[in-house]
Amino acid sequence: MPQTAAKCSQCKRKETFFNRVYSGERLCKKCFAQSVEDKVRATLVRFKMLSYNDCVAVAVSGGKDSITLLEVLAKMERKYPRAKLVAVTVDEGIANYRDEALEITAATCKRLSILHHIVSFKQLYGYTLDEMVIQLRKRGSELTPCAFCGVLRRKAMNLAALGVKADKIATGHTLDDEVQTSLMNIFHGDIAKLASEKPVTDVVHPKLVQKVKPMCEIPEKESALYAYVKGFKFQSTPCPYAGEALRNDIRSLLNRMEDHHAGTKFTVSKSIEKIRPALATLLEKGNFKECRECGDPSAGEVCRACQLLKQIG
Ligand code: SF4
Ligand SMILES: [Zn+2]
Ligand SMILES: [Zn+2]
């Protein structure tokens, strides 16, 4: 008997395009794309991430996850006329890398009629990331570019969101990002971060815009596949500074586990979600004050961004 391609388990008509091993679903292209959108919608509802009249600053780097997030939210926004989306891109100043992402993001925003707001390290801090890295190396600092960039990007994104009067910042963190970060926090013994880095951050200070992660239940592979099915343009070249050793090891470990034990990433994510409230009760509630250098919210006298900037003079 000749083998016929299995039919989609959803519509029962079209040929299978994607085998979702952890759930047993076999989906055609159309049903797969619909399922990703439905999952994002379900996550938004489950975590009560957005209100019908929110102004949302979408953090768009131009990579597959943030472009997918922007496209999915833009599609949903059409049903909520009082909601508003603004795309925000942080230009760190990385030569031969960020320019392509900026072009792709600008074109996507134009097509979707979404305002695109760009903030740059140069304009905010006086240096591009490339210039900061030169300074770090000259001074023999052991800090990696990512350690530096991560803190300064968060600050830049918050300032940009405040600037466009956003109620929330939505980021394209996927299930993979979230599980990797949680395990990194465990490996670093940073229980405070493990408790606080959740799908919807707590409101701890009026000048810190709440962050939501609508894609936190979408595996990275599915985010990429969605972008491919929809024909979105996105930047695929990795950042020249990328390569946090621990994250790479954890990523490989989790991918291996997922291959051998489908659903591992979801299981880890759900377990952490369950223990988070208990962790929060063990931690002292930090009192946020204002950084004496820049005036931004800070857990200490001087915020982490100002501490880092001091290291490059
Ligand atoms: S990979 Fe590191 S240096 Fe590059 S943009 Fe991301 S955080 Fe910044
Ligand atoms: Zn189908
Ligand atoms: Zn500061």
Image (cartoon, rainbow, N blue to C red):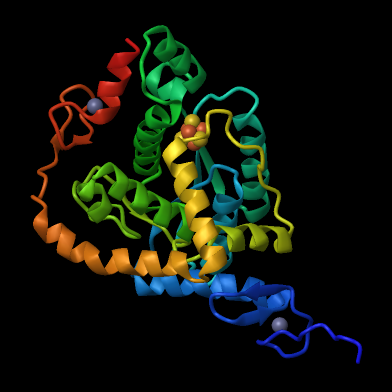
**Residue 90 seen in this snapshot:** no
The residue sitting at the top extreme is: 138
Tell me what residue is drawn at x 91 percent, y 92 percent.
Answer: 1
**Front-lying residue, 128 or 29:** 29
Among the 4 quarters of the image, the one containing residue 20: bottom right
Q: Quadrant of the C terminus?
A: top left
**Residue 208 seen in this snapshot:** yes
225 shown above or below 111: below
| Residue 48 location (% of width, % of height) | 33, 70
| Residue 118 location (% of width, % of height) | 51, 35
Among the 4 quarters of the image, the one containing residue 229: bottom right
Ligand 2, image quadrant it occupies: bottom right
The residue sitting at the right extreme is: 2
| Residue 30 location (% of width, % of height) | 71, 75
Tell me what residue is drawn at x 54 percent, y 79 percent.
Answer: 23
| Residue 97 location (% of width, % of height) | 62, 30
Tell me what residue is drawn at x 71 percent, y 58 percent.
Answer: 228
**Front-lying residue, 235 or 102:** 235
Using residue 10 as the reference point, say whether residue 310 is left or right of it: left
Tell me what residue is drawn at x 53 percent, y 24 percent.
Answer: 93
**Front-lying residue, 11 or 103:** 11
198 shown above or below 303: below
